[in-house]
Amino acid sequence: MLRGKNVLLSVTGSIAAYKSAHLVRELIKKGANVKVIVTESALQFVTTITLSTLSNNPVYKDFIKDNNTGEWNNHVDLGTWADLLLIAPATAHTISNLVTGKADSFFLATFLSCTAPVFIAPAMDLDMFKNSSTQDNLKKLKERGIEIIDPDDGHLASGLEGKGRLREPEEIVEILYQYYLDKATLKNIKVLISAGPTYESIDPVRFIGNHSSGKMGFAIANAAQKRGASVQLVTGPVKLKSPENIERIDVVSASEMKKEIKNRFNDTDVLIMSAAVADYQPIKMAKEKIKKKNTELNIALKKTPDILRDLSKMKKKQIVIGFALETEDEKKNAYDKMKRKNLDAIVLNSLNDKGAGFGYDTNKITLITPLDERKFELKSKDLVAEDILNFIEECI
């Protein structure tokens, strides 16, 4: 369940920091993508070159990346990248700073910017761990929804025996694995998603298409697999990297997309048609490139296959969700499309909303069902995907 997850590991200044190298290795072995933040004091126990080599990513420490150019590390972007923030080892000093909300370091600013689940693995001497201040701080963090990985009993760096020893890397990784296993709300659910545009050829060089980037469909696919779903993604021509742990099927035309989706539909639990399928195609494709001879060029067109309409005739137990990108009479057109194509819901987005539609990393949607509608504010397409999947979970 860690495969494909973006894990941000923060290493603070404890002698147990030497275990961070092993921890990175264990996370990588489970298929996680790992980036590491170190504090200044952590570098007394472990080197950046070790952590960078093992994680195959640069290690972050300061805001400034290059003093000569002013290039800087963006803590907000890093916090947004993370699917999970793991602070291990976490010293008593670190835990105190997390409680008070200090932001005087790159690590603390990233913590405050991160909206992903946070796990803290304390490591300190037994009396420091038992101290009422430490226990009060841990209690406050728990109340804020932060997961605490309790330390082990054992031999400590001070020479004493007791509770305060950082859990072994294999145990920490197993705890994270179990967390995602418990959160796999779409486990055993088969989700089929369409994304991107379709291109309908005019001649060997030109085509009819649209500006769809495929970002929304890919975001949904990525979010669904992280919830444990078995995901198939049928995509038109896009320049996007495949999300981890999905089956990607590349197509070009509406006819190809229909064929691939139809072949998989009967074995699907949920279909999400986010692709911007072309409405028309040339009646006949020219065999050779059309030369620029006349002032005007007339091309006879016919409708492309209506994928959702045809699938509605095959629909049995499946949950089917369509998309509608509108410019006028938006809700009416979306409602009509939902009813006409026998959809369980339709996701309406408007080109009139700034920051929504083709090409953007953000979207603003209204999720419409036969019984109600839910409006959402402008947000990243990753978060829009979560809203859509939350609705699907209600329907299952």
Image (cartoon, rainbow, N blue to C red):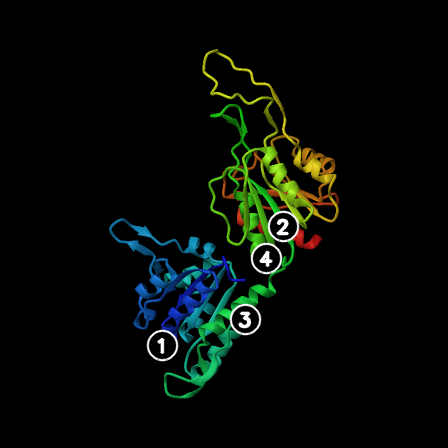
Distance (Cα) linking label 1 and label 2: 46 Å
Front disc: 4 or 3 = 4
Mark with earlier residue (1, 2): 1
Q: Quadrant of the N terminus?
A: bottom right
Residue behind mark 4: 227
Residue behind mark 1: 15
Distance (Cα) linking label 4 and label 1: 36 Å
Q: Tag 1: residue type?
A: Ile
For disc 2, the neighbor class at 10 Å (few under 14, some 14 to 19, many from 20) is many
Distance (Cα) linking label 4 and label 3: 23 Å
Mark with earlier residue (3, 2): 3
Dot 2 falls on a residue whose secondary structure is: strand
Mark with earlier residue (1, 3): 1
Identify the residue at image location x=71%, y=41%.
343
Distance (Cα) linking label 3 and label 2: 34 Å
Front disc: 2 or 4 = 2
Residue 91 placed where, x, y %?
A: 41, 74
Residue behind mark 3: 142
Residue 364 placed where, x, y %?
A: 57, 42
Mark with earlier residue (2, 4): 2
For disc 4, the neighbor class at 10 Å (few under 14, some 14 to 19, many from 20) is many
Viewer-side residue, 68 vs 119: 119
Q: Tag 2: residue type?
A: Val
Q: Tag 4: residue type?
A: Arg
Dot 4 falls on a residue whose secondary structure is: loop
Q: Give the vertical position of 248 relative to 37 (above or below).
A: above
